[in-house]
Amino acid sequence: MTAMRDAEPVGFACQSFAALSLDPPLVLFCPGRTSRTWPHIEAYGYFCVNVLAHAQQDVSATFGKAGADKFSCVPWAPAPSGAPILAGVLTWLDCAVEDVHEAGDHFVVIGRVTTLGDQRDERPLLFHRGAYTVTEPAEPTPGILDNLITWSRHDDWI
């Protein structure tokens, strides 16, 4: 997540992010109560979700560290809200803070998507069980699904 604070960019690597609604377009993320960046994002009122590409592990690691000069490692441009869009991301979502809920040791932040960036067709950066990982395209399994879809006796399987 990125935003601005006093004309300076701020951001952090978010581990809990999800799509919430298509109509209206809403997303959610869950910053920790101890986050030093979240209060600046909340005060700004807008944030940009930057979906990192697999090759951006270094960006993720930098944005995951407290106190690091996060924006020295990657060029950025402003989204319509002014929040930073990081160079090389797969896509980005410019959002307005819609609502904030307390939830244990975190907040649940609901954002309204105001602008959706173009998408690049590359692997996303995934972090699972303490390590970066990738998804591999599923190998097609010809036959079974094709047979079900094209089965001429539709009443046999419905």
Image (cartoon, helix red, strand yellow):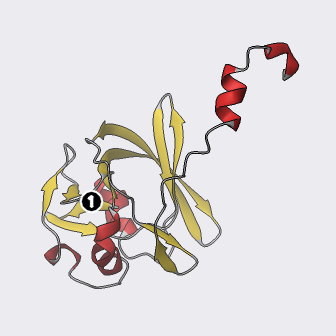
Image coords of residue 37 (percent x, y): 35, 71
Image coords of residue 84 (percent x, y): 21, 58
Viewer-closest of 54 and 111: 54
Residue shown at 48% from the left, 60% from the top: 136
Residue shown at 29% from the left, 85% from the top: 67
Viewer-closest of 35 and 6: 35
List the single residue furthest toward the front.
143
Up the image or down, 75 lies above or below 132; here it is: above
- Quadrant in which the C terminus appears: top right
Which of the 4 image quadrants contains residue 44? bottom left
* Left or right side of 57 for 110: right
- Examine the rendering and report whether any part of residue 3 can be seen: yes
List the single residue furthest toward the right.
156
* Left or right side of 79 for 120: right
Viewer-closest of 141 and 33: 141
Viewer-closest of 49 and 33: 49
Residue type at tag 1 = Ala
* Left or right side of 119 for 112: right
- Examine the rendering and report whether any part of residue 32 can be seen: no
Q: Residues within 10 Å of mark 1 (few under 14, many from 20)?
A: many
- Quadrant in which the N terminus appears: bottom left
Image coords of residue 90 (percent x, y): 30, 53
Image coords of residue 126 (percent x, y): 46, 66
Residue shown at 70% from the left, 37% from the top: 144
Figure disc tally? 1
Which of the 4 image quadrants contains residue 56? bottom left
Q: Secondary structure at mark 1?
A: strand
Residue shown at 21% from the left, 59% from the top: 88
Residue tagged by mark 1?
Answer: 3
